[in-house]
Amino acid sequence: MLPERLPSFDELPLYKDGPSGNAWGLWGEKDELGMLNRITPEVVSAAASEIKEGIRFSLDWPLDKPSHPAFDRQRFHHEILNKAPMTMNDDAIHINTQSSTQWDGFRHYGYQRVKKFYNGHQQQEFQAGAGPLGIDVFAKKGGITGRGVLLDWYSWAQKNNIARSPFETGVVELAHLKAIAAENNISFRAADILFIRVGFTAEYDKLSTEQQRTFPERKPGGLLGLEANHDSLRWLWDNEFAAIASDAAGFERGSATGPYNDPDISIHQWCLAGWGMPIGELFDLDELAEYCRAHTRWTFFLQSTPLKIPGGVASPANAVAIL
């Protein structure tokens, strides 16, 4: 049974002996969906009213982008398996689920000091194909489906002469997001799925082959993303988002363990491990943003079904926005 209301931000943590900000137990001790519990049949039905023209946008970047992933993640590999002498082919792919468009499941990132994941689970409980918090649970419940809302920070920053590279550490300020929402008359509803566009995919596609090859070793490094502080976390919680995503490679200012971030106030820790709020990264939002800007509407119906990887950590998004 869903709680009648979410606790206030100031009531966190719920599990008082646990780490800061946690909402453990809100949906029950054995819960594996977190904020996705907010996506009720009523929420999905209401979100369907966003479909006006039937225009569809795929939000997944190709699996082979970025061509040279950072953080020592292996590159995408695709193999055609010819079944000669028959005129027939199979194929096989090898991927790191963190290397292109993905949803982070709750096995991905835990509280670093106490080494615990969502609802207090620990590393030794996880194994391939079994155990709690597998991302397949998302798919079994119909995926991440509901009303998506896009905040196009990238275009707004260009209009306001704010120049920040998505390939260097830097902040997308909460005040900017609030300004974008106000200027475009965007209001949020409980269980919305938030998307923030910072320009990573658009700028990456401008790089030469050599620049893409050397991208993981670029100097200075880091990533542009939402500022990680209590104000940002309060805003995410108070708006009751079911999930949050970006075209950035890390959502929050990266790396999350950089000296500019309080180690106890990372968005990855609080959202994934504390609240059970999935984080999406490297979404392809460019065509969607162009359409939204031309039609002055920033909400849409979202269908995103992660792969049913038993015990999976993360998954390609398989996401479509329908307007």
Image (tube, rainbow, N blue to C red):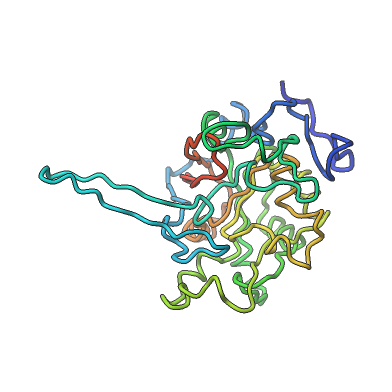
**Residue 241 in the image: x percent, y percent?**
69, 42
- Residue toward you, 78 or 61: 78
In the picture as drawn, the residue positioned furthest to the top comes out as 1
Looking at the image, the residue that sits furthest to the front is 124
Q: Residue at x 46, y 44 (%)?
A: 318
User: Residue at point 53% right, 41% down?
Assistant: 301
Where residue 59 appears, as percent x and y from the top left, is 48, 52
Relative to 235, 158 lies left or right? left
Q: How many marks?
A: 0
- In-front residue for pair 311/124: 124
Q: Residue at point 78% right, 34% down?
A: 24
Q: Residue 70, relative to residue 133: is it above or below?
A: below
Task: Using the image as rendered, state which of residue 148 and residue 203 is in the foreground.
Answer: 203
Say which quarter of the image contains residue 188. Answer: top right
Residue 314: name its quadrant. top right
Asked whether, in this view, residue 64 is left or right of residue 258, the answer is: left
From the viewer's side, name the closer residue of 267 and 191: 267
Vertical order, 96 against 158 (above or below): above
When the figure is inspected, residue 230 is found, relative to residue 275, above or below; the finding is below
Residue 6 in picture, x, y percent from top left: 79, 33
Quadrant, the N terminus: top right
Tell me: residue 306, above or below residue 213: above
| Side of 188 where 24 appears, left or right | right
Residue 122 location (% of width, % of height): 71, 38
